[in-house]
Image (spheres, grey):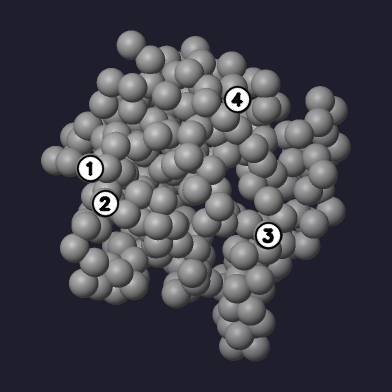
Amino acid sequence: MTLPAAFFTLHRDLPREGPGAPDDVGFAAMLAGLPESAVIADAGCGPGGDIAALLAAAPDARVVALDLHQPFVDQARARFAGQPNVAFRCTDMADLASETAAPFDMIWCAGALYFLGLTKGLAAFRAALKPDGILAFSEPCHFTDNPSKAAHDFWDGYATRLKADILSETRAAGYEILGHRPVSDAGWEGYSRPLQARIAQLGPDANADLAAILDLAADEASNWRDVKAETGYLVVVARKTT
């Protein structure tokens, strides 16, 4: 997926690139039972919004933070300068299995699987995990069997699945489900509020291209609050099976 330059103007220097909270990472790490020397991939790390939580959940682990957008990687590296057990890569998470640190004890992917698609992402990440390795990801999900048109439209054409279908596809891809839960309202607000502040800052001087992106982002924040009972992100924690 190729994003316009105006998108990155809006998202530059935001604390995170999608909904989520530190306790989502804690939930995953608790279920994972990681070894002390775990090697964790933060796939699609953005500006590093979850790195601190990963380090808190597994203090002796090595975290490899990867993103395809170099400015996000640079921002994350600056945030964690001097942290010896975090490495940064500008690379495509679809090629995670080829990373020098692979195979991983755990892959954490907050919202970014969206860009690969669930089917492709599950396969690509499975190849990058150790035997019994853990994949923890958040995926667009409909929480009701009959979501409204507004809930469908919220994801702008993405093939959003029901919870049962996400879990079934994950199992079929070679994983055992350890647990799952929705991203909380606090996780959404932690993403939306800085984004809305950035929209307000950029709005007065925005050109036509940027103004269009600002309007889309403002609508997303507003529309989520209208459909949050029907749809959102589902955090799934799964173990690779043999």
Identity of the amino acid at label 3?
A: Ala
Circles 3, 1 touching at the beta carbon (< 8 Å):
no
Label 1 to label 4, Cα distance in Å? 30 Å
Quarter of the image holding residue 224? bottom right
Sequence-wise first label, 2 or 4: 2
Q: Which residue is identified by label 2?
A: 60
Instruction: Return the mark for residue 186.
Output: 3
Residue at image location 32% in from the left, 54% down from the top: 59
Quarter of the image holding residue 223? bottom right
Residue at image location 55% in from the left, 33% down from the top: 236
Identity of the amino acid at label 1?
A: Ser
Percent of width and height locating residue 19: 59, 55
Q: Which residue is identified by label 4?
A: 166
Residue at image location 45% in from the left, 62% down from the top: 49
- One can see residue 162 in this view: yes
Label 1 to label 2, Cα distance in Å? 6 Å
Sequence-wise first label, 3 or 4: 4
- Please name whichever residue, 147 or 102, is drawn nearer the observer in this view of the structure: 102
